[in-house]
Each structure stands twice: as C-alpha cells, then as structure tokens.
Amino acid sequence: MKNISLILNGVLLVAVVVLYYLHFSSNSPSQAAVSPTPNDLKFAYINSDSVLKHYEYFKVNRTKLEAKGKKLDQDLRNRAQSLQNDFEAYQRNLSNLTIGQAKAIEEDLGKKQQNLELYRQSLEQEMLTEQSKMNTDLYAKVTQFLKKYGQENGLQVVLKFDPSSDLLFGGDSLDITTPVVNGLNEAYKTEAAGEVKKDSITRK
C-alpha cells in the first residue's frame, strides 16, 4: 500500500484536443478547402499540476481513495497481527503439544499465512483498479470539457504543461488554466448537486 500516494501523485492529464476534424470527416473538396491551415491554428495550454491541485472532482475522489487505502491497510495489519499472535501462542505451548498436534497447528498457520498473502494481493489489485478508473474518469472529464471549451473559444489544440511535458514555454496569453479549472468545478458542482438530488428522491 506504500505506493498508493505515489501512483496518485503520478496521475498525468494528457489533454491534447483536436477540434478541426472537418478535414478528416469528409473528402469533399468544398470541406477540405475550409479546413484550417497550420497558420490558422489557435493553440492554448493548461498547467496540469494546477488542474490537479484545484479541480474539486480530483481532490474529493483522491481523498476518498486514500481513506479507503488506509482502511484496507489497517485491516491487513490487524489480520497480520492476529496471525502473529497465533504463531507466538504456538511457540509458547509447543512443549506441551504432541507431534501430531504441533504438525496440525503448523499446517493451519501455513494456510493462514497463504490466505493472508492472497488477501494482500487482492487488496492491492482492488486499489490499482480503482486508481485506474479514477484516472480514466478524470481524463474523460477534462478532455470532454476542453473539447467544448475549444469549440466555444475557437481553439484547435490544447496542450498540457508540466515539468514532464514537451511544452517548454508558453506565453501567459495562451494559459487557459484558470477558466478551465473554474469551468470544470462548475460542471462538477452541478453534477454533484444532481447526484444528491437523485439520491434523496431514491430514498423517499
């Protein structure tokens, strides 16, 4: 479970949006003629670190995932401690056991140890699956929003800017991080309110 926070902190927002697909959607000369040329392309970029820092959807779900990870880790620790207690009890009483009794307890302890290892692996897989789902949902929400934002603001390409990206410099006029974060949070607020309303209706 030690790699949970590392995996979460390693989430990358690959937000490259191509909105000028008229050129690809039809081979007709009339449409090809109005496709943007390289000189007509309008670029912008977002700072992905800032998006992850301020996007409420990511903050809320990261907190939930970390809380679940801590809970599962504590459960695993409790089971491991229980097994350790059983082993120590076996050692204390070993001199009072027959060979058959000792062998039976050893086999039982071995099975418990194997089951504990399988449980640990299942928890790790469960956390990895949930992390992957969160990353996929995050990518979908951001790219879908950027597509709409790009269409409304005449953008053909939106790039990701962070220390690992190929974008080494971008003028401040091309930075759309703030309006994108605000728009993402507004959309998430509306979505969350709808889910609460739906849940309250279901409970009635």
Image (spheres, helix red, strand yellow):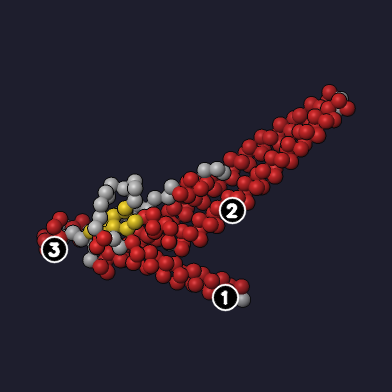
As helix, strand or loop, the secondary structure at mark 2 comes to helix
As helix, strand or loop, the secondary structure at mark 1 comes to helix
Identify which amino acid the numbered label 1 is placed on. Ile
Total tally of numbered discs in the picture = 3
108 versus 135 height, above or below: above
Q: Position of residue 3 (x, y in %)?
A: 52, 43
Query: Looking at the image, can residue 26 be seen?
Result: no
Q: Residue at x 66, y 39 (%)?
A: 116
201 and 39: which is toward the camera: 39
Q: Earlier in the sequence, mark 3 or mark 1?
A: 3
Q: Residue at x 45, y 72 (%)?
A: 190
Q: Residue at x 21, y 56 (%)?
A: 24
- Circle 1 Cα neighbour tier, 10 Å, few/some/many (<14 / 14–19 / ≥20): few
Q: Distance of mark 3 from mark 1, alpha carbons? A: 49 Å
Task: Name the residue that disc number 1 marks.
Answer: 201
Q: Residue at x 31, y 53 (%)?
A: 161
Task: Name the residue that disc number 3 marks.
Answer: 34
Identify which amino acid the numbered label 3 is placed on. Val
Q: Earlier in the sequence, mark 1 or mark 2?
A: 2
Q: Position of residue 177 (x, y in %)?
A: 33, 61
128 versus 64 height, above or below: above
Q: Distance of mark 1 from mark 2, alpha carbons? A: 27 Å
* Residue 51 lies in quadrant: bottom left
181 versus 134 height, above or below: below
Q: Earlier in the sequence, mark 2 or mark 3?
A: 3
Identify which amino acid the numbered label 2 is placed on. Lys
Task: Name the residue that disc number 2 marks.
Answer: 68
Q: Is residue 193 left or right of residue 204?
A: left
Q: Is residue 194 left or right of residue 159?
A: right
Q: Position of residue 90 (x, y in %)?
A: 80, 31
As helix, strand or loop, the secondary structure at mark 3 comes to loop
Q: Distance of mark 2 from mark 3, alpha carbons? A: 52 Å
